[in-house]
Amino acid sequence: MLKSIRAKILLAILTVTMFTACSLTGVFYFRAAGMIEENYSGILYGRMQQTIKELDESLKEIYYVNTRTAWDTDIRNNAKDYSCTENENSLENMAGLLREHSREYKDINSLYFVFPDKKMAVTSEEFPVSKQGISGEHIEELEKIQELDSFPVLVESPIHEGGSFLSVIQKVEDDNGEILGYVVADIRERAIYYEYLEAVNDEKITRIVLVDRNDEIVTSGDYSDIGKTFPEITDQNVPKMEGYAEKNGVISFFSRGSFSDCGLYLEVPKKEVLSGLSRMRLFLIGIFGAVFVAAVLLALWLSRVVCGPLRSMTGTVEKVGEGDLSLRTEVTTADEIGTLGKEFNHMLDYIEALIAQVIEEEQQKKDAELEALQYQITPHFMYNTLNSIKFAAFLKGEKELAGLIGDFVELLQASINKKGSFLSVADEIHILKNYIHLQDFRYQGSFQVKYEISEEAYRCYIPRLILQPLVENALLHGIDIKRQTGKIWISGNVSEGKLILIVKDNGRGMTKEQIRDLFNSHAKKTNGLSAVGIPNVKERLELYYGTQGGMEYVSSGNGTEVTVFLPAIYDMPEEGRKN
């Protein structure tokens, strides 16, 4: 774990710099790789399309030549004559006519006419002019292919044994619709490869093949692929694809001719396409290293600038912690650290002044405690004297007077005694009843008081003398004593964890301005039992309970209702126990 702030600054600067450099380098590299791959793929696909278009045009011309040959009247007449008479001259004539047609287009390797019933063929080549003993399988293959279509397909040549050719087949019929034979125009596989595929191939391409409309491989860079289909050489479903796509690190290209439906397929490893990025990687690594060195130097300089004043301040703080408050840190900068140094010096000045003030207050407190000890004699003397008068009145039979004096003594003790800031609601009501008993004697029964306190509320603890000022305010400013119709209701209950105490009277009520002045008045109340007034009650509730405690006044011409709310606490609060 780093303990030095300088080390943390160094680490933070290096982390941010390296993250930024790595991110930019990575984005640049992968963007460049993507552009290279896209450009290479686009160019190669364009070359493929041009090649397949040229091949398609060539096959179209061969198809037209083959069609014209099939509809040549002389060839049909010679074929009919040979079928009937087996005249060798007819074969010679047919061979000459086939040679003439084969010269119509350069890519035609040979033209030959197959007699299915004779199982022989006559060709445009010098040798052999005719081929006897063609197998029935070859004849059936030609018939089957021609029935499906006459477009170029891969066919095993019946003329050149063991050779496969891309061939166009047309049937020849007589005037009655009887089949005389089949004219076949073929192109040698190697001729197609060197004429068209070799122009596309480069050192990056690992597979290049040409397929016919049945997805049979016509020619390929690998001679062993000829005659196979795509599932045998690749797991790509490329015959359905037009364009290029990347899968498992291999970019596959495919394009078909619109006329012949022959397709050209290429495979290029992606790593071969991106092989030119090796120099770029070295260049980026060099830039990264330079940025790293610059970041280290910058971090060292910044940490020195930032941490120098901090080290000075740290030394001052350590010495101040040892007790030397006379030291002050040297402020050398105008930034946040300089502001921190100034405020630290101001804090030391304030601490020195505060210590002097505390010493003075402690001396004053000792003087006040001595004075308070002297004044304690007077309250004790008053309690003892009043108790003596109470017992004297009791002995002479003045029980009511003795009871009043006893109530006054308890009330006086509760008002003057500061021991214990909290007491139970039951004790508060007991003190309140003493006060009301005295006031009832004073006003000769001019008012009535009704209590409605729940058992749960009795057990709660509240600050001392909360209810007495409210009742006192109702007697002095609320009910009309002269009419002797005054009533005061005192209620208390617990709801949802809240203690609710209500003091209500049927007096003349108070205006909003009077209520506002009552809350905002901080003058001590000297014409009642004590100096504890309504603002004092409100302030103590806010002090002890914050927003969870308070009081509300609701007043009208029918009387005033004061609601005190505070948390319901069933144990003596910590402050009460300390006192």
Image (spheres, rainbow, N blue to C red):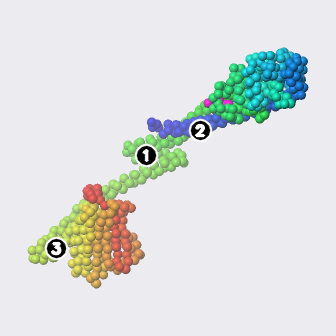
x and y percent of residue 162 in the render? 74, 17
Q: Is residue 190 visible?
A: no
**Quick one: SS at disc 2?**
helix
Residue 457's image quarter?
Answer: bottom left
Asked whether residue 251 is drawn in magenta, I would say: yes
- Identify the residue position indicated by label 1 in the image: 327
Amino acid on which the number 2 mark rests in the picture:
Thr
**Disc 3/disc 2 C-alpha distance (Å):** 89 Å
Disc with the residue nearer the chain's start (3 vs 2): 2
Frontmost residue, 524 versus 515: 515
- Identify the residue position indicated by label 2 in the image: 20
Disc with the residue nearer the chain's start (1 vs 2): 2
Residue 566's image quarter?
Answer: bottom left
- Identify the residue position indicated by label 3 in the image: 403
| Mark 1, other Cα within 10 Å: few <14 / some 14–19 / many ≥20 | few
Amino acid on which the number 3 mark rests in the picture:
Gly
User: Are the residues tagged 1 and 2 within 8 Å (C-beta)?
Assistant: no
Q: Given this view, does label 1 or label 2 mark the residue nearer the observer? A: 2
Name the image quarter holding the N terminus.
Answer: top left
| Mark 2, other Cα within 10 Å: few <14 / some 14–19 / many ≥20 | few
Amino acid on which the number 1 mark rests in the picture:
Leu
The residues colored magenta run: 248-252
Name the image quarter holding the C terminus.
Answer: bottom left
x and y percent of residue 359 in the render? 33, 54
Residue at 50%, 38% in the rendered image: 8
Residue 547's image quarter?
Answer: bottom left
Query: Is residue 89 shown above or below 563?
Result: above
The residue furthest bottom is 483
